[in-house]
Image: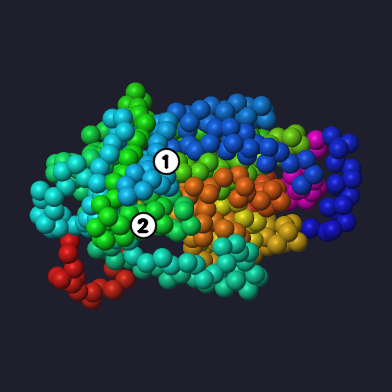
């Protein structure tokens, strides 16, 4: 885009009437930039979500309250067909209060958070510490008869390892360019199977053993230092929750307890957890809203971010940032009164943190079916779904022309991952061209994973995640007690919201469509001569 066109649009936009949409109309992109940069509501919207409502654990009261708030906001923008789409999930879990204190050999408040979906205590519990880093069922026997009335520390303490790199980082152009590499696919049939020894599967078995031995609680050490805690939990199905109150404890406090225990000081703890399970509605939901297109036969384009979060912080960068940016992008388009040719649909996904459940449900409801065992849930279903063939497209499969996702914190956009679809790179580059001066002109071939575009890509749909400056997302904030609004950068949020709106607008009006990858079929083993190691415990 020409710099003088941006300046002219910024000067005259307030007085303009809403003109009809035209494919490739740079004037509309200029107006989006003006509205988004000079009249942004991104951070005030973010404060309303993160500061007032806070963390949004899937199916919790706060998650449902936040969804109702989001739908009211989207309707206030004038969006249409604002609704929720339900999918099977599991228990709600609401945390009211908690505390933990070392009471002997001296009194120290401990930095902890309950593990999500772990049971509450009955009042305040007090017990001595026992260090029992159990990692597999074969170790249960050595602890029989030794755990009655104990609070069990189940993690290896390791050594303190302060980070050597900076906590806060922005990408250089050379680092972004290094992402422009094609990832050769590799498929290992054994790796595609659920691992029954994964900590996510084992923790519930361990809690049941500890309870049967009379232990009163278990404590695990969190995975970052600096007094951070996290509290992720995956045992949310009725009848399959953890058997004992379970705490995630800061590394510094955990290691102190271990040292005291090993030197004979007999450390003792008091702890209390006030939490409740909610089994009234075992379905979670996605929030969907639309800007109707003028051509009902042209299909639709889409943007989304996951709306659920963990409990330790306020879910600001993961993924309040992506949710707010998508909402702000919709507001920008609605504010200007411009009508796209294709319908623009936005999604605020639920259940992402438990295995992309919301976006997977949307795919199954609207786009394709895959032969997955309906008895499976959680991560077992996640693993089977990725490798279930054949894929059967539904009528709406061809209608989705593009999906854009934001879920790498709140860092400035630097471009977009083409996900190995080299044929899509020219059109993605053209749509990003107006934002090159904002630092976001890069299109790289590399794949990226871990969030809601993944299953769309897995079935051949044109779904993409943006490249973002990492800031302190991966180093400290992701899933941690630091995930508050303080770690969202307002200028970066304005830039991201504008680019999402611009990409949606370009995709909604382009005469060209993103080329799709072939519909995936069952892959062959990349190494047909790999021999399974019988020494590896299964």
- Of callouts 1 and 2, the N-terminal one: 2
Disc 1 + disc 2, Cβ < 8 Å: no
**Position of 489 relative to 39 (above/below):** below
Task: Name the residue located 41 percent from the left edge and 57 percent from the top edge.
Answer: 252
494 or 519: nearer the viewer: 494
Kindly indicate the quadrant of the structure image that contains residue 69. Answer: top right
> Horizontal and vertical percent for residue 32?
75, 45
Task: Name the residue located 36 percent from the left edge and 48 percent from the top edge.
Answer: 106
Gap between marks 1 and 2, in whole Å?
A: 35 Å
Say if the magenta span includes residue 80: no
Q: Looking at the rendering, in which quadrant would you find the C terminus?
A: bottom left
Q: Looking at the rendering, in which quadrant would you find the N terminus?
A: bottom right
Span highlighted in magenta in the image = 18-36
**Position of 265 relative to 213 (above/below):** below
Of the numbered discs in the image, which one, if any, rests on residue 537? Answer: none
Can residue 409 be seen?
yes
Say if the magenta span includes residue 19: yes
Kindly indicate the quadrant of the structure image that contains residue 394. Answer: top left
> Horizontal and vertical percent for residue 259?
31, 60
The residue at which mark 2 appears reads as 256
Q: Is residue 228 left or right of residue 47?
A: left
Q: Dot 2, how many residues are within 10 Å of its Cα: few (below 14), some (14-19), or many (20+)?
A: few
> Horizontal and vertical percent for residue 184?
42, 71
The residue at which mark 1 appears reads as 351
Looking at the picture, the colour scheme in use is rainbow
- Secondary structure found at label 1: loop
């Amino acid at each position: 885009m020409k710099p003088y066109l941006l300046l002219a649009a910024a000067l005259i936009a307030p007085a303009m009437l809403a003109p009809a949409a035209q494919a490739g109309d740079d004037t509309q992109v200029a107006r989006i930039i003006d509205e988004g940069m000079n009249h942004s509501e991104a951070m005030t919207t973010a404060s309303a979500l993160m500061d007032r409502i806070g963390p949004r654990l899937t199916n919790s009261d706060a998650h449902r309250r936040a969804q109702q708030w989001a739908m009211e906001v989207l309707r206030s923008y004038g969006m249409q067909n604002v609704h929720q789409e339900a999918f099977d999930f599991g228990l709600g879990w609401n945390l009211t209060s908690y505390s933990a204190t070392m009471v002997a050999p001296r009194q120290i408040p401990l930095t902890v958070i309950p593990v999500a979906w772990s049971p509450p205590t009955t009042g305040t519990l007090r017990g001595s510490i026992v260090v029992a880093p159990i990692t597999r069922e074969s170790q249960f026997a050595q602890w029989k008869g030794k755990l009655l009335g104990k609070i069990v520390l189940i993690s290896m303490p390791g050594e303190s390892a302060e980070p050597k790199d900076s906590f806060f980082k922005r990408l250089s152009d050379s680092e972004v360019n290094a992402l422009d590499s094609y990832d050769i696919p590799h498929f290992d049939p054994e790796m595609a199977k659920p691992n029954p020894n994964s900590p996510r599967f084992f923790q519930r078995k361990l809690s049941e053993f500890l309870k049967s031995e009379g232990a009163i609680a278990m404590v695990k050490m969190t995975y970052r230092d600096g007094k951070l805690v996290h509290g992720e939990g995956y045992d949310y199905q009725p009848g399959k929750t953890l058997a004992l109150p379970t705490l995630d404890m800061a590394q510094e406090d955990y290691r102190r307890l271990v040292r005291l225990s090993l030197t004979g000081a007999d450390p003792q703890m008091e702890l209390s957890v006030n939490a409740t399970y909610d089994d009234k509605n075992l379905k979670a939901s996605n929030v969907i809203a639309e800007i109707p297109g003028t051509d009902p036969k042209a299909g639709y384009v889409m943007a989304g971010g996951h709306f659920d979060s963990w409990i330790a912080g306020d879910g600001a960068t993961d993924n309040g940032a992506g949710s707010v940016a998508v909402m702000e992008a919709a507001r920008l388009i609605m504010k200007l009164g411009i009508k796209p040719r294709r319908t623009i649909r936005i999604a605020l996904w639920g259940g992402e943190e438990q295995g992309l459940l919301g976006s997977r449900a949307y795919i199954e409801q609207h786009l394709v079916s895959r032969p997955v065992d309906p008895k499976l849930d959680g991560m077992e279903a996640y693993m089977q779904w990725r490798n279930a063939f054949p894929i059967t497209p539904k009528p709406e499969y061809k209608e989705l022309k593009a999906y854009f996702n934001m879920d790498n914190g709140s860092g400035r956009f630097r471009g977009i991952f083409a996900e190995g679809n080299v044929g899509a790179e020219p059109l993605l580059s053209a749509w990003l061209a107006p934002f090159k001066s904002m630092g976001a002109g890069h299109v790289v071939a590399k794949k990226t994973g871990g969030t809601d575009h993944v299953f769309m890509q897995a079935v051949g749909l044109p779904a993409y995640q943006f490249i973002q400056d990492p800031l302190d997302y991966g180093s400290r904030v992701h899933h941690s007690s630091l995930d508050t609004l303080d770690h969202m950068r307002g200028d970066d949020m304005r830039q991201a919201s504008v680019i999402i709106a611009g990409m949606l607008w370009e995709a909604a009006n382009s005469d060209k469509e993103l080329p799709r990858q072939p519909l995936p079929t069952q892959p062959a083993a990349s190494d047909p001569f790999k021999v399974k190691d019988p020494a590896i415990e299964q």
